[in-house]
Image (spheres, rainbow, N blue to C red):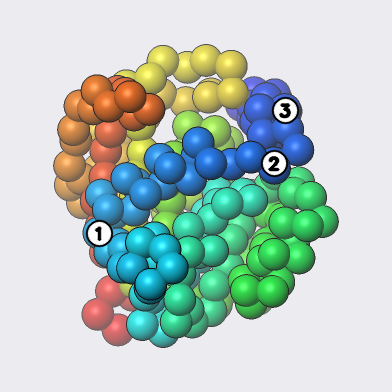
Amino acid sequence: MQDEWKKAQEFETDWWGDCLNTYGEEEKQIFYARKMGLRWFHNGKSPYNIDLGGQSVIDIGGAVSSLLLKCVNRGVAIVADPMPIPDWAHDRYASGVIEFLNRKGEELGTLKSLPKVDEVWIYNVLQHTDDPALICKNARKLGKIVRVFEWIGIKDEHGHPHELTEKKLNEWLGGEGRTEKLSLPTLRGTCYYGIFKGDSYGV
């Protein structure tokens, strides 16, 4: 699986290219966020702002365009992604006091320096990973809650070494997510989403 993951990462890195125009992905994220239970508000300049109210968040797989960039009142904010990103993207995260951690989601459970947080976000990422079950386990270990949006029922293909299913995700996340079939112009297929309890929920 490691070789398949490396090929998938090469595919993803090539797909993102210079990372300059990420509008297509960010447009989809507006929809993902709503399904993950996040609320947008208009600050007088843009309708796409999320008030975290001081909550701390780890975004697994946010690459260069994490939803954290659209959040205000952040607590600890970390983006974990193994994909190399341009220097300007590092600078943008740094200016927003968002830490970019160039690591696999599978490694996060063993990093002693990584804090436990209020929330972990996973959206449109698990198909690209080496071990999606382990990432879900790590997310539940690190966060009080885990917000998820993923596409399911897509056959293994280049760049996507895993086929996700509702049954698998429910098992990995320790709860029951919702599924919905979408036929929007830029969002087509069956999606899975929900908010799940982490290991320290309620603490």
Q: Is residue 187 left or right of residue 98?
A: left
Residue 24 horizontal side relative to residue 189, left or right: right
Residue carrying label 3: 14
Q: Nearer the viewer, residue 82 or 99?
A: 99
Mark 3 in CB contact with mark 1 (< 8 angstroms): no
**Residue with the mark numbered 2:** 19
Q: Secondary structure at mark 1?
A: loop
Most extreme residue toward the right is 87
Picture quarter with the C terminus: bottom left
Placement of 84 over or under 143, stated as above or below: above
Looking at the rendered structure, the kind of residue marked 2 is Cys
At mark 3, the secondary structure is: helix
Give the class, few, some or many, for how many residues have Cα within 10 Å of label 3's Cα (few <14, many ≥20): few
Vertical side of 76 occupied by 132: above or below: above
Residues packed near mark 2 inside 10 Å, few (<14), some (14 to 19) or many (20 plus): some
Q: Which residue has dot 1 on it?
A: 37
Q: CA–CA distance between discs 3 and 1? A: 31 Å
